Amino acid sequence: TLERFAKADVILFDKTGTLTPGNFSVELKENQVGARAKALIKSLENHSSHPIARSLVSQMPKTEPELISDVTEVKGLGMEGKTAQGENVFFGKDAEAKSDLVLQLSGKTVCRVDIEDSIKEGAKEMVAVFKKAGLETKILSGDREKKVAQVAKKLGIDGYQAAMKPDEKLKYIEALSEKQIVVMVGDGINDGPSLSRAQVGISPGGATSLAIDSARVVLMRHDEMKALTDAYKISQHTYKTIKQNLFWAFFYNVLAIPIAAVGLLNPMVAALSMAFSDVIVIGNSLRLKVKKID
């Protein structure tokens, strides 16, 4: 994993919860059901582990949720269920793209929701490190194009793909992985397949359990953006050490085998040479413990 990370060509980021903290400001628009809108939203979002859902629920501490049964997740779209009155209720992405999210009762939109998110501390500096190292940077997100474009511009990211469903993310990574070494950074349930398919999947320690299980690298520090660049630098130092060790191992063999073949190498000298080779390789590897990665 460290070798692949060191040789990566492109790094892909999920947006919400990865580049943004998921602490949203929420605005309800065109609300036709009054206080019931919040009650229905809280009821559905209580069943979701998505950063947007957690943020919405946290902003409604005094709202009493309405009883909803048969709550299920519509993959990549939102949550749906059935009210006590028998109405089908859905809360998730706005197919008409007039807002970020919509609340629907029996197929009719009764409330629209706009959300605003900030950028994670250190995200811009993190992107700059990868760009300086020659990696292509991209965002893969299910959010609206306007929102994704804003984040990409703020961070100086090379490109983005917006309004993507989980299966579309997976297909995009599969196609990209055939030509390049791909790193994917994500934290949500929907990112699990993408993290597994990329050559290197990376997840923050506070991500969903599925994302953590699917990732090959988990960032356990609270300063996730700095931890990500540190992990990359560690991978570079590790890969460099591997190449140095291979050189020294082959150097002794290439030098000693021809001399031994013509009978000019004392067996004691040969044994000492091999032992010395091991000492150099082990000592060079132990340098990783004291190296400064910056």
Image (cartoon, rainbow, N blue to C red):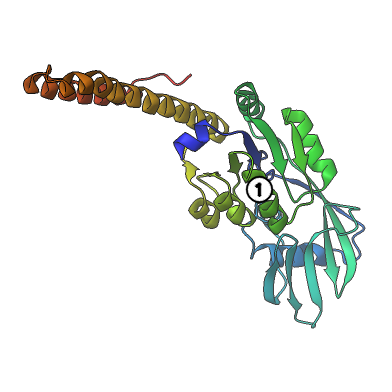
Q: Camera-side residue: 16 or 57?
A: 16
- Residue 215: image location, x then y, percent: 51, 49
At label 1, the amino acid type is: Ile
Quick check: 107 above or below 124?
Answer: below
Residue found at x 73% / y 45%: 24
Quick check: 123 above or below 43?
Answer: above
- Residue 249: image location, x then y, percent: 28, 25
Residue found at x 12% / y 18%: 265
- Residue 133: image location, x then y, percent: 60, 23
Residue found at x 45% / y 28%: 234
- Residue 118: image location, x then y, percent: 72, 37
> Where is residue 106, by image quadrant?
bottom right
> Where is residue 80, by image quadrant?
bottom right
Q: Camera-side residue: 282 or 144?
A: 282
Quick check: 44 above or below 233?
Answer: below
Q: Camera-side residue: 81 or 240?
A: 240
Q: Which residue is mark 1?
A: 173
Q: Is residue 211 left or right of residue 103?
A: left
Residue found at x 21% / y 26%: 278
